[in-house]
Amino acid sequence: MPMLADPSQKYKPYTPLVLKDRQWPSKTFTKAPIWLSTDLRDGNQALANPMTIEQKTLFFRQLVKCGIKQIEVAYPAASDTDFGFVRGLIENNEIPDDVWIQVLTPARGDLIRRSIDAVAGSKHAIIHMYNATSPLFREVVFRNSEEETIELAAKHTKIVRQLTEECTAKHGTQFIYEYSPETYTQTEPDFALRICEAVKQAWGKAGPGEDRIIFNLPSTVEIAPPNHYADQASCCEISLSTILTLVQIEDFCNRISEREKIIVSVHPHNDRGTGIASAELGILAGGDRVEGCLFGNGERTGNVDLVNLALNLYTQGISPGLDFSDMQSVIDVVTQCNDLPVHPRHPYAGELVFTAFSGSHQDAIKKGFESQKALHAAAAAKGEPRYWNMPYLPIDPADLGQNYEAVIRVNSQSGKGGIAYLIKQHLKLDLPRKLQVAFYQVVQAISDREAREMTIEDITDAFRSTYYFGGAKWKGRLALRNFKISTERPSDLSDSDSDAEETRHFDGTLAVDGTYRVIRGDGNGPLSALLAALRTHLDIDFAVRDYSEHIISEGTDAKAASYVELVPANDRKAATSWWGVGVDSDIARSGLRAVLSAVNRAIGDRVLPELKLSVGFTAGSGQADVSSAIVNSLGLELPRRLQSSFFEVVQRQARDAGGEISYEAVTALFQKTYGFNVEGAFNKVSLTSHKLKQLGEGRRQLIGEFLFSGEPRSITGEGNGPLSSVIAALQTQVQGTFSIREYSEHSIGEGADVVAASYVDLAYEVAGSKKRSAWGVVTDADITTSGINAILSAVNRLDVVFN
């Protein structure tokens, strides 16, 4: 059905209050109100998936951390879960001494008792009772007269008084009483006043300070402009659980008796989009207290936003008494618990609120910073306040833990959200905002050049080719082949220094323009270690400016997607940067792939240092160069300790050859030293055949046919796996003992041609002789055979005493 041409035939306007002497329009803010968070009650009941006890506890701690002193925690009579949550807060000592918890209850004796039982033993508690008072509810829902409605509220107020006094006597809990004439804004003003007077009289204990009674005047649905809300509240200290308008507040405050014994608290909703204005004008009209939620969660369009209200005061130079110095941590907790996002344009907290998209806006902000820097320097010299006065930025982002970076230019914005959506739908990548901007520039350039609409395939192909993403077809100049990350603690730290920063070592093999290169580097994490390796070996010098990650899918198919922004290492604030994307089932590898993706974009066709075919040690070539020669000639990615061991061998050979050794000589020297693919290398002991038998409980038995100096022998051994089993078998044939110091393996080749490469550092110790060790290196199509023969290769290189 379309909208009506004459909506007056369907909707009635609100009835304004006539106040001859309004005071609130000329008032200004001088202090912060009392803040009450109802996130855990009013906010929680509006969630599609209500919070768990763990989430509510986390949220409660965040509210306390922000400095909120009154927190409505539950409707404990509604469920055992809510009751248990309140008891848990008390019994686990989660409530600071200066924090009041509040619970909500309807006007029913059994539910009132259950609510008071929930808070028994707490130091401070507010009991919040309500009953509906509007004609619609009196006449249609409850079929009560005005007098019966008043009697209901007064009678149950007396019950609250009796039970709270008993609880105080038994447990010492100090109580404040809050009453809500529910549907207040649809209630006749005179009747609302009468019922509140009756409740106050029934309570009989209203006094100054913490003895004040709270009246909650709910605007259950916002139906009028905010000025009407202020007029309603300007008579007494009333808690507006969404009071209709300012007119109502001022009228109530002017007419209620014993104003000094009453707290007026405003609790607007946002049905008309004026919740903030209603709350602010309601405070000007006489309210002392605001009930709301962080970032405006709540039924329908939400409760008033306490963050917004508090920071509005802050920007007027009035301390709100709340701390949002780390806004992102508040956002993280709220979104985690509510499972609702904070809108990118949400005041003070949205992702984009401190970002200028317009070129003219950016220019104004830039000039504003330049001017403010000079003004602040002059003010500091005079000892005067350094006032914040910036175009388009009403608050200093740094006060909220944010920065000043405006990253998006006007010409790069149109349609970036749509492009990002397609990438997420088809590649499962949820791009960071700055990467969305960067990639849209790529798409826009292609679209402008080809003067046609970009298809989904065009966009995904452009993404793959730009960020070298998605397989061999899109591989860049640098590709990760293999790597190992190891950790080293500073040697001068004790075991108690658990928070000390550890060094990460990257040791890996890259394909660089089709040639394998072994590179190494150290850093405080895998990414910085890889960047250090690229700097050392390939003269590629970049630093990470931004990094983010997320999970793609779940369970056994889960993969990590990583996004890295690189900048020149000597200019971390550079305007030019390069983004990279990596996906892998291993999160460390995902991040490393993202770094190489960005590096491939950055280096373009730049000439990189070549692998030297002549290793001149007097010229400073290192073991990585030697290891690169081996991986390129033999396909062997040597373990780091084997690299070091062989490098010593190469150095001695080069020294004897006048300081130089050729590429071919390095390969031949490796084969000779370790008997790799050399005929006769297994002259002492060799394997003819073997069989592995499962023994249960993880044990295995090796049954093997061996040749010992040409003599066949059948031997057996038991262990936890093939290697320990063959060691046990060999122990029966020799004097002394063997032990494996290090073992590693990897594959060489692809498809049907793949073989396993195995490396074993084997130690041998026999009485009367010094302990010695040797490396064994073998490849074989069968990985078990490869490992066994690597042990035998090492045995053949050791001076073993056989039986």
Image (cartoon, helix red, strand yellow):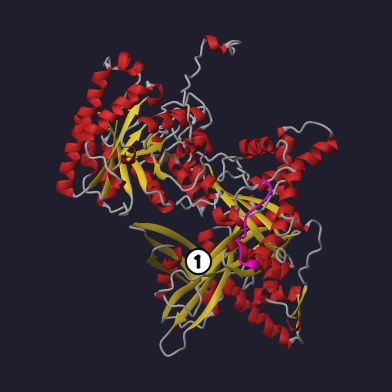
- Choose between 697 and 290: the one closer to the eye: 290
Q: In the image, is 515 to the left or to the right of 63? A: right
- Choose between 451 and 416: the one closer to the eye: 416
- Choose between 467 and 344: the one closer to the eye: 344
The correct choice, above or below, for 215 with respect to 191 in the image is: below
- Neighbourhood count class around disc 1 (C-alpha, 10 Å): few under 14, some 14–19, many 20 upward: many
Q: Quadrant of the C terminus?
A: bottom left
Q: Position of residue 287 (x, y in %)?
A: 42, 38
Q: Position of residue 565 (x, y in %)?
A: 67, 55
Q: Is residue 476 visible?
A: no
Which residue occupies the extreme top position in the image? 9
Q: Quadrant of the N terminus?
A: top right
Per the image, the residue denoted by label 1 is: 788
Does 309 appear in magenta?
Answer: no
Q: Position of residue 94 (x, y in %)?
A: 31, 52
Q: In the image, is 417 to the left or to the right of 701? A: right
Number of labels in the image equals 1
The correct choice, above or below, for 425 with respect to 470 in the image is: above
The correct choice, above or below, for 721 with respect to 259 in the image is: below
Q: Which residue lies at the image location 56% right of the left edge and 49% below the top edge? A: 315
Which residue occupies the extreme bottom position in the image? 768
Quarter of the view holding residue 80: top left
- Identify which amino acid the numbered label 1 is placed on: Ile
- What segment carries the magenta color? 382-392
- Choose between 308 and 577: the one closer to the eye: 308
Q: Position of residue 116 (x, y in %)?
A: 22, 39
